[in-house]
């Protein structure tokens, strides 16, 4: 417990401590408002009319409530295809990545594993140096994994950062005596990993799972480079196409009223697209938030 907290409990808080609390509270409040207001504005604009958005009438609450933007988004059949593809890629790649992370982390956490320092160094080396985009594309093309759902699932199916966090958790948070006692009871390594180690690692595993899901859900560059057929595109690329289709060169429109209406609907559509692609992740976050401090910090205690 720090000194300021002890002073609060005893009722002896100096004026300098009060000023410090006020300054910190003000900074945090400004920071939260800076993050929160754009989210509120986007959500309110998506439920407002195009005229209200274009004229700048929307501040906090929807003005002239309208669902036209969402109707335009969901009437576009490719959106549902994008959702299905994104769900498939997100679930598939998360499972594959987690399987790789768990297995490698467990092996490298065992002190009895010969050469674990060497293999750990190899993994860390891959974080610092890579061939880059062009050699990676040549490699994927040479393996025939381009334009394939299954090929995309196994591309880059290892995250060294999360593997090191998981390995550290196995080393520091789970006592070695637990493995020894399990071995005495006849438990195999596979049984120990899945029945004892992983249940104890649920906090850090939940945090890693959330990060992997968010990263895959928002993945844009990978599908754009390696998945050329439009029927394989995830939601992010579909929404990009919607935005491009909703934007037109106003200098090419002779009718001023038509140009104004197109600009209004383009703004509403833009905010609707942002909400559609963001809401699933915002709904997922509260379910794993409680694991953040306990899981991620425990997995990062030591190198």
Image (cartoon, helix red, strand yellow):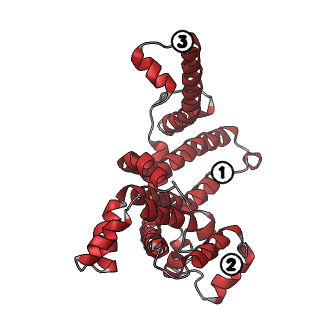
Q: Nearer the viewer, mark 1 or mark 2?
A: 2
Q: Which residue is mark 3?
A: 14
Image position, residue 70 (x, y; %): 46, 47
Residue at x 44% of width, y 72% of height = 106
Asked if residue 119 is positioned above or below residue 284 in the image, the reply reads: below
Q: Nearer the viewer, mark 3 or mark 2?
A: 3
Asked if residue 60 is positioned above or below residue 228 in the image, the reply reads: above
Farthest residue to the top: give it.
15
Dot 3, crowdedness within 10 Å: few (<14), some or many (≥20)?
Answer: few
Dot 2, crowdedness within 10 Å: few (<14), some or many (≥20)?
Answer: some
Which is more toward the observer, 134 or 8? Answer: 8
Dot 1, crowdedness within 10 Å: few (<14), some or many (≥20)?
Answer: some
| Figure disc tally | 3
Which is more toward the observer, 243 or 102? Answer: 102
Q: Which residue is mark 1?
A: 247
* Residue 228 in view here: no
Q: Which residue is mark 2?
A: 136
Q: Nearer the viewer, mark 1 or mark 3?
A: 3
């Amino acid at each position: 417990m720090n000194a300021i907290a002890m002073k609060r409990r005893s009722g002896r808080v100096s004026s300098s401590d009060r000023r410090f609390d006020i300054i910190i509270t003000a900074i945090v409040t400004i920071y939260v408002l800076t993050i929160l207001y754009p989210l509120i504005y986007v959500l309110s604009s998506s439920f407002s009319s195009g005229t209200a958005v274009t004229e700048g009438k929307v501040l906090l609450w929807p003005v002239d409530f309208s669902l036209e933007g969402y109707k335009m988004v969901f009437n576009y059949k490719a959106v549902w295809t994008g959702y299905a593809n994104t769900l498939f890629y997100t679930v598939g790649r998360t499972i594959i990545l987690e399987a790789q992370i768990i297995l490698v982390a467990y092996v490298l956490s065992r002190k009895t594993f010969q050469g674990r320092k060497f293999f750990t160094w190899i993994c860390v080396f891959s974080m610092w140096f890579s061939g880059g985009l062009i050699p990676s594309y040549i490699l994927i093309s040479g393996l025939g994994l381009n334009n394939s759902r299954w090929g995309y699932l196994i591309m880059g199916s290892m995250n060294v950062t999360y593997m090191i966090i998981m390995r550290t958790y196995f080393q520091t948070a789970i006592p070695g005596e637990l493995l020894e006692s399990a071995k005495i009871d006849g438990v195999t390594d596979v049984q120990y990993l899945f029945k004892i180690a992983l249940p104890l690692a649920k906090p850090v595993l939940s945090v890693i799972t959330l990060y992997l899901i968010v990263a895959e859900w928002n993945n844009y560059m990978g599908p754009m480079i390696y998945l050329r057929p439009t029927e394989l595109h995830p939601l992010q690329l579909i929404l990009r196409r919607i935005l491009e289709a909703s934007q037109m060169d106003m200098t090419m429109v002779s009718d001023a009223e038509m140009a104004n209406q197109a600009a209004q609907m383009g703004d509403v559509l833009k905010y609707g697209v942002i909400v559609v692609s963001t809401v699933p992740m915002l709904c997922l976050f509260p379910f794993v938030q409680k694991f953040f401090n306990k899981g991620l910090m425990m997995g990062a205690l030591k190198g």
